[in-house]
Image (cartoon, helix red, strand yellow):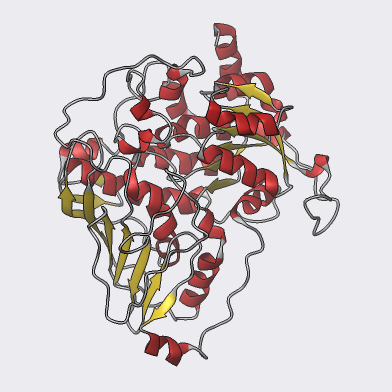
Amino acid sequence: MDKSGKNQRREFLKTSALALGAITILPRHIIGATRTSVAPSDKVNLACVGIGHRGAGVVNALHATGLANIVALCDVDMGAKHTTEIMNKFPNARRFRDFREMFDKMGKEIDAVSIATPDFSHFPITMLSMSLGKHVYVEKPLARTFNENELMMLAARKYKVATQMGNQGHSEANYFQFKTWVDAGIIKDVTAITAHMNGKRRWHGWDTNMKGFPKGQPIPETMDWDTWLGTAQHHDYHQDFHHGQWRCWYDFGMGALGDWGAHIMDTAHEFLNLGLPYEVDPLKIEGHNSLFFPQASTLAFRFPKRKGMPACDITWYDGVNNVPSVPEGYGVSELDPNIPPVGNGKIQPAKLNPGKIIYGKDLMFKGGSHGSTLKIIPEEAAKDMAGKLPEVPQSTSNHFANFLKGCKGEEKCRSNFDVAAPLSQVFNLGVIAQQMNAKIKFNAKRKEITNHKLANQLLVGAPPRKGWEEFYKL
């Protein structure tokens, strides 16, 4: 980008408050309109940043609602094989490799932005989008550091935009069931939750004695590597940072916890008002390495008493053989066919499929991942409760439609940043405990780790790369 483009963007940032007030989305002309009956002028003009792999799924799902016009496509590897599906599907959308250039050239034509890029790069794209008055849909986890999550949550309030984190189960059956059962007192006095994801991960089997990052390789012709790096410190290009491999490294991703925690722990975190833990204890770290995630980990998150609710521990298990024990009467571990594929394109059945066990005062519950509903266990207890359970309302919209309706002021986004940022901060604290291989004590009021100086510094992380500082000032 030339200097004139950067100057234009800075001037645009100065006037973002005015830009916010100027954006108008026309009201719906037809109440209850279907996908085919929504007029183009009634749709949200959507720019999509990250269009390959998971990004392609996000673009397709937002488009399938019939509530969005796809007006811009942005990807640092535009034209590579994994981006061609979306490029071909939306040939009239303008194309960019750099999100900053996209806003410089067509910012006034954009109402909202979807962001499906590596975890570490969510922050600058989201902050610039919100500062320009754009609504944002951001894949989970929200951001790589505790401080970035905090800044994103505060910016969403400041700029008064609709926000949604992409844990799609938060608009499905489990969301409504969990809320209804808490409100009705079916789920109450929860003191312990087991959360588990024991599937094989990309870094499993790596040499845990590794002392440095892999040596650089030639940058693909389609790749804008400098923009891919964004705020991160410089790394030479390597295939083990690309195509989802970034999730393996502390510098770029959030491991199994950030990837799956948002699909497993989300409803308990919101409806039990868990907030932030006062302690995270790594009960087990197998194959510790300071560069990439463990081969297996068990983390105990300890949450304090809240109004009307007792203290609660969530114990997280990852690693193929690091399977938690289950209570008597647990039954069969079902694999929900609705869980979307990851990595190699399919979910491999594990010894215990992804999910949770919730221990309340009077009842126990088992649940899966994403939108999977809870079951009361053991079976005898479920039979006793069968006629006492309240009716659970149906979802009015899936997660993608909920976001776009949020942009139009028709619904409240269910995983908005006030909900999603604190949840993601729980994962940030867990990842710090994994990386340090040490128990951390956290003061939620002061937002600091009190017993480990280096761990406390990781709440903010390394300073942004030169030229990327402005996103932390928006």
**Percent x, y of residue 97:** 56, 21
- Up/down of 178 relative to 401, above or below: below
- Up/down of 265 relative to 97, above or below: below
Dividing the picture into quadrants, the one containing residue 270 is bottom left
Residue 287 visible somewhere in the drawing: yes
Quadrant of the drawing holding the N terminus:
top right
Dividing the picture into quadrants, the one containing residue 101 is top right
Residue 16 visible somewhere in the drawing: no
**Percent x, y of residue 311:** 28, 69
Residue at x-position 40% and y-position 33%: 120
How many tags in the picture? 0
Question: Closest to the observer: 408 or 47?
Answer: 47
Dividing the picture into quadrants, the one containing residue 79 is top right
- Up/down of 165 relative to 172, above or below: above
Question: Closest to the observer: 202 or 417?
Answer: 202
Residue at x-position 57% and y-position 43%: 57
Q: In the visual, does 18 lie left or right of 138? A: right
Q: In the visual, does 243 lie left or right of 18? A: left
**Percent x, y of residue 427:** 33, 49
Residue at x-position 22% and y-position 58%: 322
**Percent x, y of residue 284:** 16, 54
